[in-house]
Image (cartoon, rainbow, N blue to C red):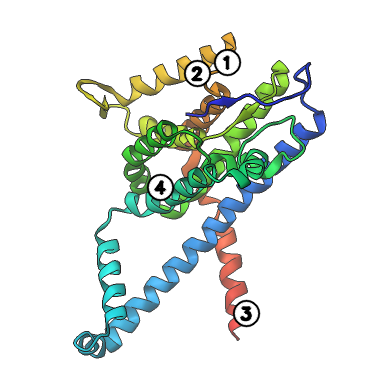
Amino acid sequence: MKPTIAEPVPESGAVPSVNVIKAVAFTGAFSFGCFAGATIMEYENTRSMILAKAKQARFGWWQSRSLVDRDTWSQLKHDIKRHWDTLTPGDKMFAPIFVFNVLAFALWRVPALRTTMMTYFTSNPAARVVCWPMFLSTFSHYSAMHIFANMYVLHSFCNAAVLSMGKEQFLAVYLSAGVISSLMSVLYKAGTRQAGMSLGASGAIMAVLAYVCAQYPDTQLSILFVPGLTFSAGAAIKVIMGIDFAGCVLGWKFFDHAAHLGGALFGIFWANYGAQVWAKRISLLNYYHELRRTKQK
């Protein structure tokens, strides 16, 4: 979840209009960059896979022979790679996200970094620094329960989302969703004149959750520690979004309901229109391919 942390702000709670403009511009530029980067990553990963298979076909006999005589370091790298290869696609995407979240959680425990963390790892539309905190705050958790709940939910739905989208598209959606949910929080706080701090990965996770629930609405879900209670994914996302909508209307402040709702709406949008949007990357793929081929000549 994305709780709100109290911070001294102007008495009126007003959000400078220039900060809202910055937030909108940053969200557009960041999201475009995420999908452009994911497109290039997809190209490079596919190219590397093809070259690796071609190399294995030509020199596989030599590689098999070299396995016999390995030093300790080479053996360790081989064992790590073998374990990594046994992970599901979702676990492979979850692992680095989890590590970054844990690192940010650890940094909150360093007193000397507290000011830096408050400045760059919490999102506050009334603050002097607005843009990068919209992104960095999506990896930031202060309490152990907060990070546990978010990472548990992400891990539960990550594999289904990655299998449906592919790892590059998933990464672009996840990172963009985090910033888009922060933007929804900024707009809500500006509209209600209730500036304040927010942090947490739940906006991005809500996008993943909503995407999976929209794609597989009949899937049966249950709650941790209450395995006997089951319900459909379609019903679950409706209830969750209903609660967040009520939180926005009634002004509940324990969670950043606007960020949750923004992430969920983006996830549902991507479930319905993401394939068409993602298909538009072909022109960029062709351009990058030609650019790379020209540089190799």
Dot 1 lies on which element?
helix
Q: Is residue 172 left or right of residue 234?
A: right
Q: Nearer the viewer, mark 3 or mark 1?
A: 1
Q: CA distance from mark 2 to mark 1?
A: 6 Å
Q: Position of residue 25 (x, y in %)?
A: 73, 41
- Which of marks 4 and 2 precedes in the sequence? 4
Q: Nearer the viewer, mark 2 or mark 4?
A: 2
* Residue at (33, 51) in percent of width and height: 91
Q: Position of residue 57 (x, y in %)?
A: 28, 83
Dot 4 lies on which element?
helix
The crowding category of the residue bearing disc 3, from other C-alpha atoms within 10 Å (few below 14, some 14 to 19, many at least 20), is few
Q: Position of residue 41 (x, y in %)?
A: 50, 62
Dot 4 amino acid type: Met
Image quadrant of residue 114?
top right
Q: Which mark is residue 165?
A: 4
Which residue appears farthest toward the front when viewing the image? Answer: 111
Q: CA distance from mark 4 to mark 1?
A: 30 Å
**292 and 105: which one is in front?**
105
Q: CA distance from mark 3 to mark 4?
A: 30 Å
Dot 3 lies on which element?
helix
Q: Which residue is mark 2?
A: 244
